[in-house]
């Protein structure tokens, strides 16, 4: 695993979602360790790609997923650059990946961010059984698979009998190796911008708001959780909602401005808000995969209160007291735990969390694990 090609089939620079940020950070840190080339779509700001080469070979429309011309185009890139390993983001290009492996002999890995058919099943897509068959076929034939959560890996090895030796952990990571020292300064900036008093706790929810799991979670906050918080006479707070894509009919949440709700929309520096907040709310009950915002929030010293489904994939032991998990849809307990977390908001993030989720540690593990695997076609 020395000269690597990654196929990233959509725009990720600049990043706006957790999934885009995952790819961007993974490629950045991988490019620091290995000679890396990325084939992707043209709708990226390639000036942000530091430490690796980019080639915009993929078409923008959905037809890119069945573009037969990619067989020769990607094969040529592999030969010209003497690539020995190809990593495909998501399983959608599996048909192409195995044709190219047969023509070139490269090691072929898939970086899966979810068990994809489960995600689409949870969001009501009728064609999820077809994707289930395709995804299983992809995992069976791959030289290796990178999994974002232990639960996804356990599903693949247990339900589909995928060889555990080719299943590699690749969690979402963070840049920092310790809790930041500027949390108070960040709190002051956010408080000044949104007119929040010193006595008020700062609660946060963020995400793409046109994504159904996030929108459902937002509605649970507005209609179930926040009324309980409001009814607590001694609890003072403001709840900031960050994210783009809010449906127009919700009128920028103006109907909730008298209910301690602040709609900030898309913010350029979400890290500022993570560090300023006392508690991150994660009432997301569908969608699959790890919620990247939870990892980031805890890394920045913020406590997370999450439903059980939303906490899937998190290392509970490493998170310690900074992650509180309640049963799905138990909104009364969810609200109670928010208030309890605010009383203990100064508890620090454990060093074990940074050992687990720091990007440098993650990449070193990935390279070591992937290098040890041999391709069934070449034995290399």
Image (cartoon, rainbow, N blue to C red):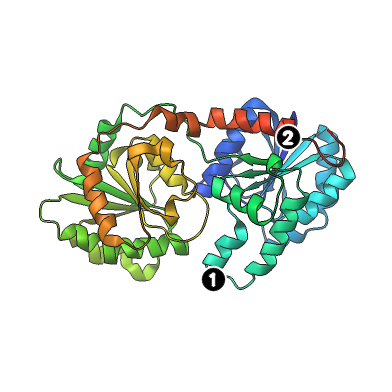
Q: Is residue 143 above or below residue 207?
A: above
Residue of label 1: 124
Nearer-N-terminus badge (2/1): 2
**Residue occupying the point 87% across, 37% down:** 378
**Residue occupying the point 35% across, 63% down:** 329
Residue 50 visible (yes or no):
no
Marks 2 and 1, Cα distance to the nearest angstrom? Answer: 36 Å
Q: Is residue 249 above or below residue 347?
A: below
How far across and down, in percent of the image, does residue 86 sit? 75, 40
Q: Work out which residue is located at the far bottom of the displayed protein and give it.
A: 126
Q: Quadrant of the N terminus?
A: top right
How far across and down, in percent of the image, does residue 62 sit? 68, 62
**Residue occupying the point 31% across, 31% down:** 348
Name the secondary structure under disc 1.
loop
User: Is disc 2 surrounded by few (<14), some (14 to 19) or many (20+) residues within 10 Å?
Assistant: many
Q: Nearer the viewer, residue 78 or 98?
A: 98
Name the secondary structure under disc 2.
strand
Residue of label 2: 4
Image quadrant of residue 185?
Answer: top left
**Residue occupying the point 58% across, 37% down:** 26
How far across and down, in percent of the image, does residue 364 sit? 61, 28
Q: Nearer the viewer, residue 98 or 190?
A: 98
Image quadrant of residue 187?
Answer: top left
């Amino acid at each position: 695993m020395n000269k690597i090609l990654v196929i990233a089939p959509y725009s990720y620079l600049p990043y706006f979602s957790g999934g885009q940020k995952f790819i961007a950070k993974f490629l950045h840190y991988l490019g620091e360790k290995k000679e890396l080339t990325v084939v992707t779509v043209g709708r990226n700001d390639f000036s942000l790609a530091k430490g690796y080469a980019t080639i915009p070979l993929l078409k923008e429309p959905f037809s890119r997923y069945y573009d037969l011309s990619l067989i020769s185009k990607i094969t040529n890139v592999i030969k010209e650059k003497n690539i020995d390993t190809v990593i495909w983001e998501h399983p959608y290009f599996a048909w192409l990946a195995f044709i190219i492996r047969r023509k070139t002999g490269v090691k072929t890995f898939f970086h899966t961010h979810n068990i994809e058919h489960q995600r689409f099943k949870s969001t009501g897509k009728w064609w999820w059984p077809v994707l289930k068959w395709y995804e299983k076929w992809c995992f069976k034939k791959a030289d290796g698979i990178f999994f974002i959560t232990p639960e996804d890996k356990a599903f693949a090895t247990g339900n589909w009998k995928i060889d555990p030796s080719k299943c590699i952990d690749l969690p979402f990571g963070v840049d920092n190796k310790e809790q930041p020292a500027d949390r108070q300064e960040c709190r002051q900036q956010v408080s000044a911008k949104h007119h929040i008093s010193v006595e008020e706790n700062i609660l946060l929810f963020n995400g793409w708001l046109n994504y159904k799991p996030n929108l459902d979670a937002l509605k649970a906050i507005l209609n179930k959780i926040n009324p309980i918080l409001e009814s607590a006479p001694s609890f003072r707070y403001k709840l900031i909602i960050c994210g783009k894509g809010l449906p127009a009919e919700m009128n920028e949440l103006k109907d909730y401005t008298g209910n301690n709700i602040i709609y900030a929309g898309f913010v350029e520096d979400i890290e500022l808000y993570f560090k300023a907040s006392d508690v991150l709310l994660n009432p997301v009950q569908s969608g699959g995969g790890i919620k990247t915002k939870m990892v980031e929030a805890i890394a920045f010293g913020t406590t997370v209160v999450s439903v059980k489904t939303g906490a899937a994939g998190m290392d509970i032991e490493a998170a310690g007291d900074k992650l509180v998990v309640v049963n799905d849809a138990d909104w009364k307990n969810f609200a109670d735990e928010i208030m309890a977390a605010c009383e203990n908001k100064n508890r620090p993030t454990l060093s074990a969390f940074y050992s687990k989720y720091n990007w440098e540690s993650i990449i070193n593990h990935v390279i070591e694990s992937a290098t040890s695997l041999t391709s069934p076609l070449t034995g290399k």
